[in-house]
Image: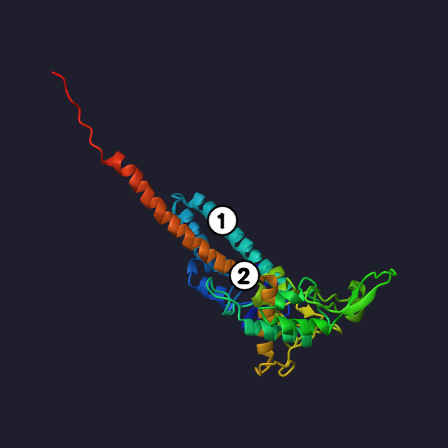
């Protein structure tokens, strides 16, 4: 069954079940593993070209070969030995076919779920590290200049930026520049007023239907909790923003979609928004595309975990208190039990 699912094609072999724009299968790995075990490679007829292999399959090949040779050597009669070899071959083939199918399924899931984003050395990732507040400030500027036209941050208030990215006066000035619908007034009518620190960041669209209509049916998600709502949060955001590529050969993207291997399915409705010089920083930092991606990722990570620094400080204080209580408890234990454990009992025998 394993052999029937493969087709030879020149120097490489492609698995029929995973032939897609992302799956030129890693053929030579299984070939090397099979050729290193001549006994097993002789039993699998027709496999003379490299085939696809996963890490689980490479680990299972030696175990299947040992099981096969052990079963065959344990038989004393030639007649029963032939049947045992066939049974062992069937078992080994079942193991290989199952693992091969699992590797194909994993490849298909990887295509559907998107390419796994790498891990980046974020300066706030350590247990004793804090957020880079200058990066958070620049990230908010990237959001205002690039992202705010489509994406909302409806769970973030202006007051939360005070002491983190801006002073109170700066935050008040930015909030005052926005218009907020309020009311009703004494006449029962809604009215607009300048924004205050207590207000939320403005919404780009009045409702979801307006957002979909303006974006070709796609709904731009809210970004406030994006770092916690996506697997591998901050790494995924950075990889997505910097991962736009030309489609592979043979793949045609539908109009309005763009190829990004880190997005599930590989087709995303958002075009590449971060380009060199696409934003302007008030501190003079060069606004390269990767710098903008790093800063907006820091800002979105902070908006998802705004109390992270305070929680880490509180955790350190709690550990210090616990260690102090541990020392006091140890001293009290020894003080209480020392007279009991050190006492001497003498039996006075009566003649």
The front one of 14 and 3 is 14
Q: Residue at x 66, y 67 (%)?
A: 158
Q: Position of residue 331 (x, y in %)?
A: 32, 45
Inspect this view and state whether residue 15 appears.
no
Residue at the limit of the structure toward the front, as seen here:
186
Inspect this view and state whether residue 135 appears.
yes
Q: Is residue 294 left or right of residue 210?
A: left
Q: Mark 2 points at which residue?
A: 308
Q: In this view, does 299 lie to the left or right of 53?
A: right
Q: Position of residue 175 (x, y in %)?
A: 70, 71
Q: Mark 1 points at which residue?
A: 86
The front one of 111 and 70 is 111
Q: Position of residue 117 (x, y in %)?
A: 56, 67
Q: Quadrant of the C terminus?
A: top left
Task: Count neighbours of disc 1 (C-alpha within 10 A) and say few if under 14, some if 14 to 19, many if 20 or more.
Answer: few
Marks 1 and 2: which is nearer the front? 2
Residue at the limit of the structure toward the left, as seen here:
351
């Amino acid at each position: 069954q394993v052999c029937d699912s493969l087709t030879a094609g020149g120097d490489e072999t492609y698995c029929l079940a995973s032939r897609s724009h992302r799956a030129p299968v890693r053929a030579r790995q299984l070939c090397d593993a099979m050729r290193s075990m001549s006994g097993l490679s002789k039993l699998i007829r027709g496999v003379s070209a490299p085939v696809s292999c996963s890490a689980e399959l490479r680990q299972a090949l030696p175990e299947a070969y040992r099981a096969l040779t052990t079963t065959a050597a344990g038989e004393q009669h030639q007649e029963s030995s032939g049947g045992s070899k066939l049974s062992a071959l069937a078992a080994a083939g079942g193991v290989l076919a199952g693992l091969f199918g699992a590797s194909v399924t994993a490849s298909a899931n990887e295509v559907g779920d998107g390419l796994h984003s790498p891990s980046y050395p974020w300066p706030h990732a350590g247990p004793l590290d804090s957020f880079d507040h200058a990066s958070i400030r620049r990230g908010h500027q990237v959001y205002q200049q690039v992202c705010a036209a489509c994406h909302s941050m409806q769970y973030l208030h202006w007051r939360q930026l005070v002491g983190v990215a801006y002073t109170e006066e700066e935050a008040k000035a930015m909030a005052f520049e926005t218009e907020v619908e309020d009311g009703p007034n004494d006449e029962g009518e809604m009215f607009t007023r300048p924004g205050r620190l207590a207000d939320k960041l403005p919404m780009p669209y009045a409702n979801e239907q307006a957002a979909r209509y303006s974006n070709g049916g796609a709904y731009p998600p809210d970004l406030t909790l994006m770092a916690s709502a996506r697997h591998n949060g901050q790494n995924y955001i950075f990889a997505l923003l910097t991962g736009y590529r030309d489609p592979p050969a043979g793949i045609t993207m539908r109009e309005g979609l763009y190829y990004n291997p880190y997005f599930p399915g590989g087709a995303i409705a958002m075009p590449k928004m971060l380009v060199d010089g696409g934003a302007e920083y008030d501190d003079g930092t060069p606004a390269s595309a990767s710098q903008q991606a790093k800063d907006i990722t820091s800002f979105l990570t902070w908006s998802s975990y705004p109390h992270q620094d305070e929680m880490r400080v509180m955790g350190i204080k709690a550990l210090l208190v616990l260690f102090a209580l541990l020392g006091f408890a140890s001293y009290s234990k020894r003080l209480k039990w020392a007279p009991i454990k050190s006492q001497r009992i003498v039996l006075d025998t009566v003649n």
